[in-house]
Image (cartoon, rainbow, N blue to C red):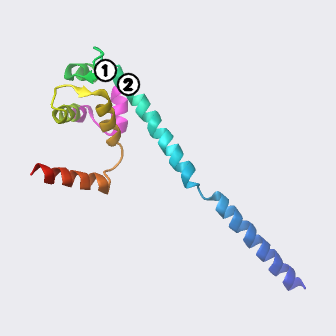
Amino acid sequence: IGFMQIALLNILTGIFVEQAMKLAQPEYNALALEQRKKEISEAAELRRLFASLDTDGSGKISPAEFKAKLRDDKLKAYLSVLGLEIRDATFFFEMLAEISDTSSVDLDFFVDACLKMKGNATSLDMQSLAFETKVIH
């Protein structure tokens, strides 16, 4: 009888622990939603920050506007979070201007490019680069 009680308690404990483990696992939909909300929030913050760069209201950031704003500590801090040093930020802006075939860079294009700078390059990024290089040659 004692053995049966221990076996029953062991089974009940196993069921309880299994249910607790299922509840403790992160729900991937909720995590994906939180990540997406964070990305949208960061994009909105970046748009607000860079909208202040556009002093003439053209919707584009000129090299003069960008260089003038580089003195701003908030911009420096945000670029640092993105992993861009000021020297790199100038090169980054010039590269985007070259891609857009004008000296100015569209605000949305600039924001999207900055957001892509966060984190490490993915295999998709590398494949995209290889494809673009192949198309050029």
Magenta span of residues: 73-89
Is 127 or 64 nearer to us in this picture? Answer: 127
Q: Which residue is mark 1?
A: 53
- How many marks the image carries: the answer is 2
Amino acid tagged 1: Leu
Q: Relative to 120, is 37 above or below?
A: above
Q: In x, y percent, where is residue 64? A: 20, 19
The image shows residue 37, relative to residue 16, as above or below, that is above
> Can you give x and y, in whole percent of width and height, for residue 24 in the image?
64, 58
Residue highlighted by disc 2: 49
Left or right of 100 on screen, residue 5: right
SS at mark 2 in the image: helix
In reply to whether residue 32 is colored magenta, the answer given is: no
Q: Secondary structure at mark 1?
A: loop
The residue at the point 25 percent across, 54 percent down is 126
Query: Label 1 neighbourhood size at 10 Å, few (<14), some (14-19), many (20+)?
Result: many
Residue 82 magenta: yes
Q: Quadrant of the N terminus?
A: bottom right
Q: Residue at x 57, y 49 (%)?
A: 30
Q: Amino acid at mark 2?
A: Leu
